[in-house]
Image (cartoon, rainbow, N blue to C red):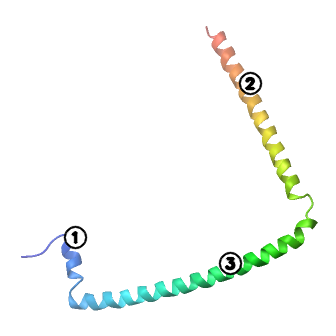
Amino acid sequence: MKCLGFYCFFNRLTEPPYKEKLKSIEHKLFTLEEERHETGKLLNQQLSQLNFIAKKLVSEVLDELNPKPGEIEQLMVELKNKSQAVKKALFGVIEEVIEDDELYNK
């Protein structure tokens, strides 16, 4: 009886020639996972070092910034408020056109 279907495909993978190939691949995957883990640890160490350096540099340079971060924040708030006001005015004009069109077409 010939085996058909998805299950049979995986069942054949457990036969000796394929089983050895799969063991080899499994070993390579395990090795890759160990290398990924080690690389991740090195990356985390380097990011910690860079974070420390950046904090040190920022504290040294922060006083020299012009404009100050708080001033930029205020400018952004003002820009947002002005943008909202312009959008409100635009939609107000659009509403007027719609209302006038409704009155005109009655």
Q: Residue at horizontal 78%, vertical 33%?
A: 85
Say what secondary structure mark 3 lies in. helix
The residue where tag 3 is placed is: 47
Q: Nearer the viewer, mark 2 or mark 3?
A: 3
Q: Please give the name of the residue rendered at 89% of the width and 58% of the height, measured from the top-left corner.
A: 68
Label 1 with label 3: CB-CB less than 8 Å: no
Residue 42 lies, with reference to residue 75, above or below; the image says below
Kind of residue at disc 3? Leu
Residue that badge 2 annotates: 93
In the rendered image, the quadrant that contains the N terminus is bottom left
Query: Marks 2 and 3, Cα distance to the nearest angstrom?
Result: 52 Å
Local crowd size for mark 2, using a 10 Å CA cut-off: few (<14), some (14–19), many (≥20): few
Report which residue position mark 1 lands on: 6
Position above or below: 69 against 85: below
Q: Is 97 displayed left or right of 2 in the figure?
A: right
Q: Quadrant of residue 105?
A: top right
91 left or right, relative to 70: left
Residue at the top extreme, as displayed = 106
First in residue order: circle 1 vs circle 3: 1
- Residue furthest to the left: 1
Q: With respect to residue 80, does 19 lie above or below?
A: below
**Residue at the location (88% across, 53% down)?**
71
Q: CA distance from mark 1 to mark 3?
A: 46 Å
